[in-house]
Image (cartoon, rainbow, N blue to C red):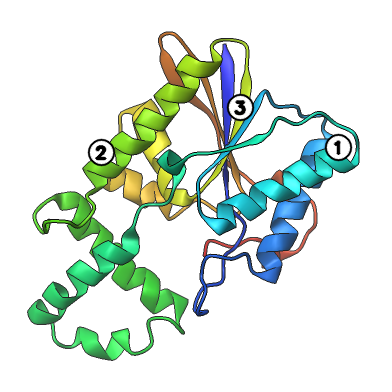
Amino acid sequence: MSEIYFVRHGQASFGEKDYDRLSPTGIRQAKLLAQHMVRTGQFFDAVYCGTLLRQRNTAKELIDSFSERGIDIPELFISGDFDEFDSLAVWTAQIPMMLGENPALAADLERVYSDKKIFQRIFEQVMYRCVSGKFDKPGVPSWSDFKKRVERGIHKIMETHGSGRKIIIFTSGGPISAAVQFSLGLTDSKAIEISWQIMNASVTRFKYNSRGMMLSVFNDITHMEMEKDNELITYR
């Protein structure tokens, strides 16, 4: 039996010009996770991450913490299979159609990047439309293609590393929810709902063997709860 740890990146820079970098809180979250893994004697046979900067920088905190203490850590392997779902492309495609159906949406869109609640409400509508398959547009990513990409990445890892291994993947909420969907046989809509519950720098674990993969731990943030600081608990 082998194990895969999926780690969501630390908080990114929502509302900033460059979203794809860790915020000060995100850096702190990543450091706390790395320190917790050192304290609890974790080890990994392989370390993966997606190509995004926020994913790579979260992984870097673990690699640096292990290396500074002389703990063996494999070289980071970067795979686009674990990149986040391209929600910006979907947003860009869906919003004009949504405005055509509901012109009053324009007022909320003016505050969408300054008010996280407004953003989340509209983003949920966008993603439900996306997974329904009723509003697909040529050239725009579909959830179906995305989850197949994540499943492909998981299968590659399972085939490459075999049994008795422990793997860690630094990724985003979308791939983690797709992995949960894959392991539990959930609907696309349920996978999307799960993605909104995944906290920054949380750990979700799966066990796998030749028969398949099963969820064992979901959305663990023990390393942050121990700090007793609610500002560390973030979703976006």
Q: Is residue 164 left or right of residue 79?
A: right
Which numbered disc, 2 or 3, marks the residue that appears first in the sequence? 3
Which numbered disc, 1 or 3, marks the residue that appears first in the sequence? 1
Q: Which mark is on residue 187?
A: 2
Q: Nearer the viewer, mark 1 or mark 3?
A: 3
Tell me whether the residue at label 1 lies in contact with that at label 2, contact meaning CB atoms closer than 8 angstroms: no
Determine the image quadrant of residue 177: top left
**Residue 176 in view (yes/no):** no
Q: Nearer the viewer, mark 2 or mark 3?
A: 3
Give the camera-side residue of 153 and 217: 153
Q: Which mark is on residue 39?
A: 1
Q: Residue at x 62, y 57 (%)?
A: 10
Residue bearing mark 3: 167
228, above or below 155, in the image: below
Q: Residue at x 67, y 23 (%)?
A: 45
131, above or below 182, in the image: below
Q: Is residue 131 left or right of residue 117?
A: left
